[in-house]
Image (cartoon, grey):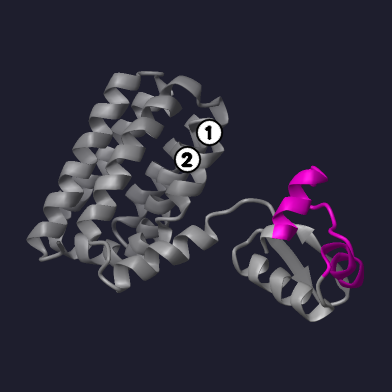
Amino acid sequence: MTDIRRLIGERQLMPGDSLPAENALAAELGVSRTIAREALRGLAALQIVEVGNGRRARVASSNADALSLILDHTVHTRQLSIQQVLDVRRTLETRTVNLAALRRSDAEAAELQRIVAAMQVALDGNHEEIMELDIRFHEVIARASGNALYSILIESFRVITRQTWHIGWRARGSYHNRRDNIHLHDRIARAIAAHDADAAEAAMSEHFDGAVATLLRAGIN
């Protein structure tokens, strides 16, 4: 796999570019076609290349899937706790929200405000929809930071969020507490729209204070 990654780098291949056919790749690397095929499958599992029946392997676009699997594995095997994950998220997201307030586009600011409005509507009905909107809210902020690595890192937390979100939502209990949580998202969105980095960061920090405390009350360490 290392040799294929080196080949991608040496040829300066970009996402969507095709690699040599299996036979040519095996000959160039001095290995059997079977070994070349297995190496490509391994890289495909890591989302480094894309493979499909009847076409040559291509360089994949970066995404959060592989990192998400690693996070899920480390949490399930208790190498990381949920609170440790939240601690890292807090560090990342207080930075992304600061950058988003400085760099966001008008379209991104409007999208955040639309998400909050949809969360407020869903409060009286579909709580599953609120979870998905919540995930999207944080991912839009990461995208608005202007740093693609932040987007990958924040998106990788999606699988963990889906496992813990309902616990936190139930622990908030009352309609009033749940509404306040959505209002906090509104404060974050408004601060980003106003290019107020300090207010955005303070609101995001308050948001994570609440999330940590809520999960601790629910027995999630």
> Most extreme residue toward the front, as rendered?
30
- Give the magenta range: 3-30
Give the camera-side residue of 73 and 40: 40
Q: Amino acid at mark 1?
A: Asn
Q: Farthest residue toward the bottom?
A: 34
Give the side of residue 95 with respect to residue 219, left or right: right
Q: Specify the quadrant of the image occupied by residue 220.
A: bottom left
State the residue in front, 153 or 117: 153
Answer whether residue 15 is visible to the viewer in this image. no
Q: Position of residue 49 (x, y in %)?
A: 71, 61
What secondary structure is found at the residue carrying circle 2? helix
Q: Position of residue 126 (x, y in %)?
A: 35, 64
At 48% from the left edge and 58% from the top edge, which residue is drawn? 67
Residue visible at 40% across and 61% down in the picture: 129
Identify the residue position indicated by label 1 in the image.
Answer: 147
25 magenta-colored: yes
Does residue 211 lie above or below 185 as drawn?
Answer: below
Could you say which quadrant of the image residue 198 lies in? top left
* Position of residue 77 in the picture relative to residue 151 (left or right): left
Q: Amino acid at mark 2?
A: Tyr
Choose between 84 and 23: the one closer to the eye.
Answer: 23
Alpha carbon of mark 2 to alpha carbon of mark 1: how far? 6 Å
Q: Which mark is residue 150?
A: 2
Q: Are marks 2 and 1 in contact (CB under 8 Å)?
A: yes
Q: Residue at x 82, y 64 (%)?
A: 29
Tell me residue 18's x, y (percent). Answer: 85, 57
Residue 47 location (% of width, % of height)? 63, 61
| Residue 94: mark | none
